């Protein structure tokens, strides 16, 4: 209603230019005319209720592209994480026997698996950075353009008619998949709300990717240097946690850190 | 001398004329505020009060809230609403204002989402969030303390979280677009 009134007001102002009196007249005329149009023509009234949809065909293509890249990486990195987690669990037994030969092999395995995870991610980083960055940019601009001149109370009124988004929405690929599948289904989810949430996820992902980009080579060097220690320090744990979160991999970071702490304090058998 | 005495007499006379004789003060309506422990009885008092002093609607409403808090019940919501609907229909109180008060205290949806454009949300975010939080506290008074309607209050809490997330996501995107354009 407000938008329609505004448009008609602008139109009337174009016909009756200048002076404040004319402007006031234009405003009054617009208000009455809008009321008339909305009452007489239900099509116009219905038209204003069309919910905002920022997922244009172009944005949809970008989301699909990101979805494919992210799911590909998720599939590739998951087995490496499994190996790392398995080695960390086995290493738990070694806390009491640090000089055991088998334990030395496990420690080396931890370092090797950690390095493999980082290398795999490092190789894929430019591709994922490009895909996620361009999707976030396209979706962000589309949301901005389509909603910039709307009132938030009207927008929220539309959103509140739909069912709320679930709290847990899975890994990034699943989130991107969800927004793609919304078009083919009879979902009661608001496209605008889902677009805004997906955009928030993409922005968080770009921040994580930037962080990984900065930290990954430093951590790789650290792992190579400390390979024989077979531990995960808090810095490494943070990166692995970020990677796991980004790709929806179930990785027990607290457990890894707990192990690292134990390793650090238990250095001498005589002190046990 | 005679002249002076005459002038004084005339002056006294004039002053005397200019002073008004003490008359009756205009009638001030006596507004008895609802009180006690029974909301039904308090509503009857509020009925009279709203008829006599519609401009004191807010005080009357708060007095009723005090009464309802003694015995919270889900039926209290309709007692409040019917009272205000009746008086709005009679034109004693503004329908818009009465609706707004009822919505703030008894509805799971929010009155405090302002009609501002998306590009203004970033600068207004703090005050929007403050108003929403305040409205949630009013809903606690209305829904929980007056009506014992925990289910509706929980719904209002979820709605509150949803609106905050919506606003946060708008602000996040506006900043992202600005920094990446």
Image (spheres, rainbow, N blue to C red):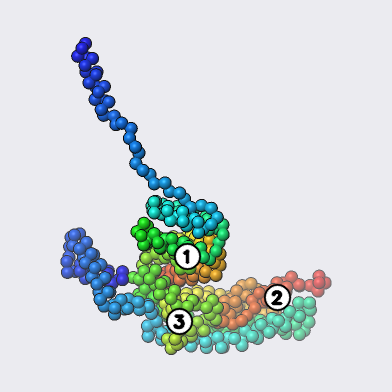
Crowd around label 2: few <14 · some 14–19 · many ≥20 (10 Å): many
Q: Residue furthest top?
A: B1
Residue linked to disc 3 = A188
Chain of the residue on which disc 1 is drawn: B
Q: Secondary structure at mark 1?
A: helix
Q: Secondary structure at mark 3?
A: loop
Chain of the residue on which disc 2 is drawn: A
- Is residue B79 at least partly visible in the picture? yes
Image point 66% across, 74% down: which residue? A254
Q: Are marks 2 and 3 in contact (CB under 8 Å)?
A: no
Label placed on residue B78: 1
Q: Alpha-carbon distance for marks 1 and 2?
A: 60 Å
Image point 81% across, 72% down: which residue? A272
Q: Are marks 1 and 3 in contact (CB under 8 Å)?
A: no
Q: Alpha-carbon distance for marks 2 and 3?
A: 45 Å
Residue A237 locus on image (x, y percent):
62, 75
Image point 25% across, 76% down: which residue? A40
């Amino acid at each position: 209603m407000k938008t329609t009134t505004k448009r008609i007001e602008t139109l009337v102002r174009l016909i009756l230019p200048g002076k404040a009196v004319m402007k006031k007249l234009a405003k009054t005329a617009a208000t009455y005319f809008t009321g008339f149009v909305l009452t007489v023509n239900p099509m116009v009234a219905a038209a204003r209720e069309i919910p905002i949809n920022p997922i244009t065909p172009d944005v949809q293509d970008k989301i699909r592209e990101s979805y494919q890249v992210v799911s590909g990486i998720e599939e590739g990195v998951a087995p490496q994480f499994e190996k790392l987690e398995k080695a960390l669990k086995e290493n738990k037994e070694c806390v009491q026997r640090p000089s055991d030969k088998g334990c030395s092999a496990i420690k080396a395995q931890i370092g090797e698996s950690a390095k493999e995870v980082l290398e795999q991610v490092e190789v894929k980083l430019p591709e994922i950075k490009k895909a996620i960055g361009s999707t976030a940019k396209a979706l962000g601009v589309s949301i901005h353009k389509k909603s910039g001149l709307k009132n938030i109370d009207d927008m929220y009124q539309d959103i509140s008619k739909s069912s709320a988004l679930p709290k847990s929405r899975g890994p990034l690929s699943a989130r991107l998949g969800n927004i793609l599948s919304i078009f083919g289904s009879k979902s009661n989810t608001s496209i605008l709300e889902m677009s805004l949430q997906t955009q928030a996820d993409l922005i968080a992902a770009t921040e994580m990717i930037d962080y990984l980009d900065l930290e990954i080579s430093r951590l790789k060097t650290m792992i190579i240097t400390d390979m024989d220690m077979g531990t995960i320090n808090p810095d490494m744990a943070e990166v692995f946690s970020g990677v796991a979160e980004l790709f929806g991999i179930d990785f027990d970071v607290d457990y890894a850190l707990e192990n690292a702490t134990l390793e650090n304090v238990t250095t001498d058998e005589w002190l046990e | 001398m005679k002249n002076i005495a005459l002038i004084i007499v005339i002056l006294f006379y004039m002053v005397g004329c200019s002073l008004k004789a003490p008359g009756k003060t205009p009638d001030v309506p006596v507004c008895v505020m609802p009180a006690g422990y029974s909301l039904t009885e308090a509503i009857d008092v509020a009925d009279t009060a709203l008829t006599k002093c519609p401009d004191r609607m807010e005080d009357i409403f708060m007095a009723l809230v005090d009464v309802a808090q003694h015995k919270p019940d889900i039926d209290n919501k309709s007692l409040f609403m019917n009272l205000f609907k009746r008086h709005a229909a009679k034109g004693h109180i503004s329908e818009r204002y009465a609706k707004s008060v009822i919505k703030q205290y008894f509805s799971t949806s929010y009155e405090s989402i302002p009609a501002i454009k998306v590009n203004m949300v970033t600068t207004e975010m703090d005050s929007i969030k403050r108003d929403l939080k305040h409205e949630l506290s009013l809903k606690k008074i209305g829904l929980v303390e007056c009506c014992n309607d925990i289910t509706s209050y929980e719904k209002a809490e979820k709605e509150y979280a949803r609106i905050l997330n919506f606003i946060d996501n708008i602000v996040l995107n506006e900043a992202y677009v600005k920094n990446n354009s």
